[in-house]
Image (spheres, helix red, strand yellow):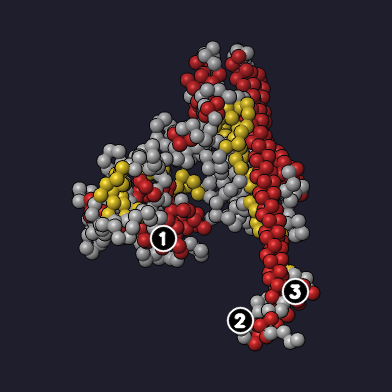
């Protein structure tokens, strides 16, 4: 008996369905395998970065303590033993001994951080981090390239030599040859992590917000909640007259110590330290007359990266490298740091950064062998489905597509932001180490800190695009018609500043001419009160505008008459489906309060703001 035509057309349909389901299951299994590989790699990288940062930070701590011990030896030799007035020969011997001690301190400031560099590499490798980009690649990590470039700049015979007339023997130590030899030795052992230090770059940028990479994209995309953009659009209109983009900065200079894992020290005479401070550091038993006799002694002290405030004790120190991201109050509110860390955490100076990355192969490079049928169901080519399903089963279900890899971790040579771990030597006394001025041996521990807490410049020998742009900008007299083109790859920075120079743009974010005069509540559901350069030049900028929400539970046909409804911690004022909020003080909630996470901290930075929520409305 002949089968009906419909039955023949259904032949093989189960097989097609089974193949599709099987392919889906295989793809899901491959995805789960990739997911676990990524999680495993991320955990391994995080562990390695933390181990490397802690290892380097511990050697920074030991180096500072050794330098501090030698400071005390200098004090003991000249003060505590009360050396009497001596003849010229004895005075020469004492001077020679003190110079030897100073040379030892200088030697430690180069060698100690490089031991930290080597220790960080070993810690990372012990935690399974490869010195190659991937297991099957012969390509070394990008840190090799940057370190080799750094070595070129240290070689006086190289065309890239970058040290000019830098002293060959600062503080009596001939640093260059042993420093280079140690770097080459560490390089030969293999590099797994990128360190931080003081490398070519800009510091003390003024105004500092020009040095914020995120500001420029925020301008171009009107991200008014960006902390710096939020702050500067509120500047008085007079600020934007003239050459407001006049940028000032200093180039990073040779610190006369290791540029890798820098300790942040300087050598200074007794006169620079100050008698009163030196007596405080060395003890009240030391007489001022004895201190006055020490003018020829060079003490190892903390440099400008350590203290938060300038010489007057109140103004912010732009060189400060410590926890100023958001202000000290941000880090001391109890949500980030254990209370026993706070008292000896809030200073700058030495910090150890370590970042690494790895590229892993993905199983998802495999794809189904069953291709899309060439015709839709109901046409003559519909039987093509069965043929393709059978072919897939006969020749394996999946095929290899192009090689796919995923980078896990951070690489500062290509990534915009740093993303490694940071460790910091901890001071054991109840006051910051800079109160003692000279280095003392009271660093007792090292701890991981949030990576955003202390500024760390990863090893990068060349200037970043933003730094190149700021150097170019310093010579620009006409922002809209500069005499020369900006450096390659930096046009977007110029476009952003040209946009910021437009008062229409600034007023669309925050209009200083908006008085906030009371309007009928219904007006805030309309656009009439908002800034418009043509029709409403005194209107509210986006940050000042009243936030409007939509309640999906309200019918579309709901009346637009104004009604109020208590909602626990606030009051909702409805007009149809839309509503605005009134806080407990009777004030309407703005976009800035409801959407932005931070409020501005002024021209030098930002401080944490108030997030609108149940506890504040």
* Along the line of sight, the residue nearer the viewer: 375 or 63: 375
- Residue at the disc numbered 3: 392
- Residue name at image x 63 percent, y 26 percent: 444
* Along the line of sight, the residue nearer the viewer: 39 or 67: 39
Q: Cα distance, mark 3 to mark 1? A: 50 Å
State the image coordinates of residue 596 (x, y, percent, origin top left): 39, 48
Q: Residues within 10 Å of mark 2 (few under 14, many from 20)?
A: few
State the image coordinates of residue 194 (x, y, percent, origin top left): 65, 48
- Residue name at image x 53 percent, y 50 percent: 201
- Residue at the disc numbered 2: 376
Q: Contact, CB < 8 Å: mark 1 with mark 2? A: no
* Along the line of sight, the residue nearer the viewer: 253 or 56: 56
Q: Quadrant of residue 415?
A: bottom right
Secondary structure beneath label 3: helix
- Residue at the disc numbered 1: 220
> On the rendered structure, is 502 left or right of 190?
left
Q: Contact, CB < 8 Å: mark 3 with mark 1? A: no
């Amino acid at each position: 008996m002949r089968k009906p035509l419909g039955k023949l057309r259904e032949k093989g349909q189960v097989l097609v369905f089974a193949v599709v389901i099987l392919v889906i299951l295989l793809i899901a299994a491959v995805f789960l395998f990739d997911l676990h590989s990524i999680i495993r790699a991320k955990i391994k990288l995080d562990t390695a970065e933390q181990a490397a940062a802690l290892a380097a930070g511990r050697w920074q701590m030991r180096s500072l303590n050794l330098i501090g011990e030698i400071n005390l030896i200098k004090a003991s030799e000249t003060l505590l033993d009360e050396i009497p007035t001596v003849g010229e020969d004895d005075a020469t011997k004492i001077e020679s001994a003190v110079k030897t001690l100073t040379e030892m301190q200088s030697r430690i400031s180069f060698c100690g951080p490089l031991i930290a560099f080597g220790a960080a590499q070993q810690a990372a490798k012990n935690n399974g981090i490869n010195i190659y980009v991937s297991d099957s690649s012969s390509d070394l990590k990008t840190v090799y390239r940057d370190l080799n470039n750094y070595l070129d700049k240290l070689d006086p015979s190289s065309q890239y030599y970058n040290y000019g007339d830098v002293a060959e023997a600062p503080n009596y130590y001939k640093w260059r040859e042993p420093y280079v030899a140690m770097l080459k030795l560490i390089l030969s052992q293999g590099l797994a992590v990128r360190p931080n230090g003081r490398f070519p770059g800009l510091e003390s940028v003024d105004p500092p917000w020009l040095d914020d990479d995120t500001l420029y994209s925020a301008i171009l995309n009107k991200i008014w909640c960006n902390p710096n953009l939020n702050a500067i659009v509120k500047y008085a209109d007079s600020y934007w007259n003239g050459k407001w983009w006049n940028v000032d900065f200093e180039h990073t200079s040779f610190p006369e110590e290791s540029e890798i894992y820098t300790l942040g020290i300087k050598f200074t005479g007794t006169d620079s330290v100050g008698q009163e401070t030196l007596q405080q550091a060395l003890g009240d038993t030391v007489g001022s007359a004895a201190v006055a006799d020490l003018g020829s002694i060079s003490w190892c002290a903390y440099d400008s990266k350590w203290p938060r405030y300038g010489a007057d004790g109140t103004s912010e120190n732009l060189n400060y490298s410590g926890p100023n991201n958001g202000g000290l109050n941000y880090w001391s509110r109890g949500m980030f740091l254990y209370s026993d860390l706070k008292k000896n955490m809030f200073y700058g100076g030495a910090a150890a950064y370590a970042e690494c990355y790895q590229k892993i192969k993905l199983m998802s490079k495999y794809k189904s062998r069953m291709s899309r049928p060439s015709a839709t169901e109901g046409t003559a080519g519909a039987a093509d489905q069965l043929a393709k399903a059978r072919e897939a089963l006969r020749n394996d279900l999946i095929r290899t597509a192009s090689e796919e890899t995923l980078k896990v971790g951070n690489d500062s040579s290509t990534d915009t932001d740093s993303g490694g771990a940071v460790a910091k030597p901890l001071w054991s006394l109840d006051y910051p180490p800079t109160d003692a001025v000279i280095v003392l041996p009271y660093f007792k521990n090292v701890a991981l800190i949030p990576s955003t807490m202390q500024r760390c410049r990863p090893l990068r020998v060349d200037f970043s695009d933003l730094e190149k742009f700021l150097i170019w900008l310093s010579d620009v007299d006409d922002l809209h018609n500069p005499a020369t083109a900006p450096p390659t790859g930096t046009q977007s920075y110029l476009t952003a500043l040209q946009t910021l120079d437009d008062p229409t743009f600034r007023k669309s974010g925050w209009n200083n001419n908006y008085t906030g005069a009371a309007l009928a509540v219904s007006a805030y559901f309309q656009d009439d009160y908002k800034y418009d350069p043509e029709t409403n030049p005194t209107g509210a900028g986006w940050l000042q505008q009243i936030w409007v929400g939509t309640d999906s539970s309200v019918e579309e046909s709901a009346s637009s008459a104004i009604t109020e409804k208590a909602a626990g911690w606030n009051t909702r004022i409805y007009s149809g489906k839309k509503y605005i909020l009134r806080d407990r003080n009777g004030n309407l909630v703005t976009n800035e309060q409801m959407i932005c996470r931070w409020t501005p901290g002024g021209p030098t930075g930002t401080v944490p703001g108030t997030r609108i929520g149940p506890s504040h409305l």
